[in-house]
Amino acid sequence: MTGAENPIAILPVSVAAIFDAPNVADLIHAYAAACWIPDAEPQRPIYDAMERAGIIHVFGAYTDFEGSPLLVGFASVICSIMPHDGHLVATLGEMFIDKPYRHTDAEDLLLSAIEQCASDSGARCFICQARIGSKYDKRLSQRAGFDPIFTQYTKWLNGYGAGRQA
């Protein structure tokens, strides 16, 4: 089953709902590969602490699989007051849709949900990062209201480069 058969539902969920999903190990592995971070180790205690502090808001993308909800994607938005100017800003923490479901509207639905969360929080802006030239970069450039106003540069340190260990 690949998402064409069933609609995708986007739900606000707890950090635990993502980390405790039966298929989360496969999703995290696929997410890490897509982000060029093969040794990614999501830090659940940090996510839990951020959730308790009300800083992170998490969403799951689900479809029905044999009568049960199946997690096929996730996203988070981090809302925090910037110490340098005192204003609330929302930042995309992560967003991932499993490859078999990317042809669905899951990505747009997930992005809309986290945009709305950012707006509802009272944030001044919603900041997203995308790898230059990626499908996500192209999608954001075509999405209403998203302006490319900064360029981000990364200098890899300590033997790391492009997400790969030396």
Image (tube, grey):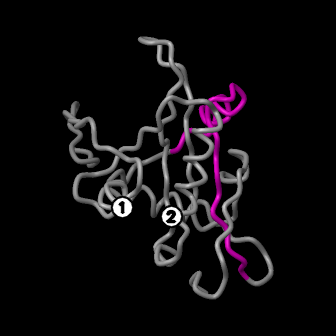
Residue at the spot 31% in from the left edge and 55% down from the top edge: 141
Other residues around mark 2 within 10 Å, as few (<14) / some (14–19) / many (≥20)? many
96 sits left or right of 134 in the view: right
Q: Which residues are magenta?
A: 42-65
Report the front residue among 109 and 44. 109
The residue indicated by pointer 1 is 139
As displayed, is residue 36 above or below residue 70?
above
Amino acid type at circle 1 is Arg
Q: Which residue is mark 2?
A: 107
Nearer to me, 50 or 86: 86
**Labelled pair 1, 2 in contact (Cβ < 8 Å):** yes
Rendering coords of residue 150 (x, y %)? 26, 35
Local crowd size for mark 1, using a 10 Å CA cut-off: few (<14), some (14–19), many (≥20): some
Q: Residue at x 56, y 51 (%)?
A: 75
Q: Position of residue 166 (x, y in %)?
A: 21, 44
Q: Residue furthest right?
A: 67
Q: Residue at x 62, y 40 (%)?
A: 44
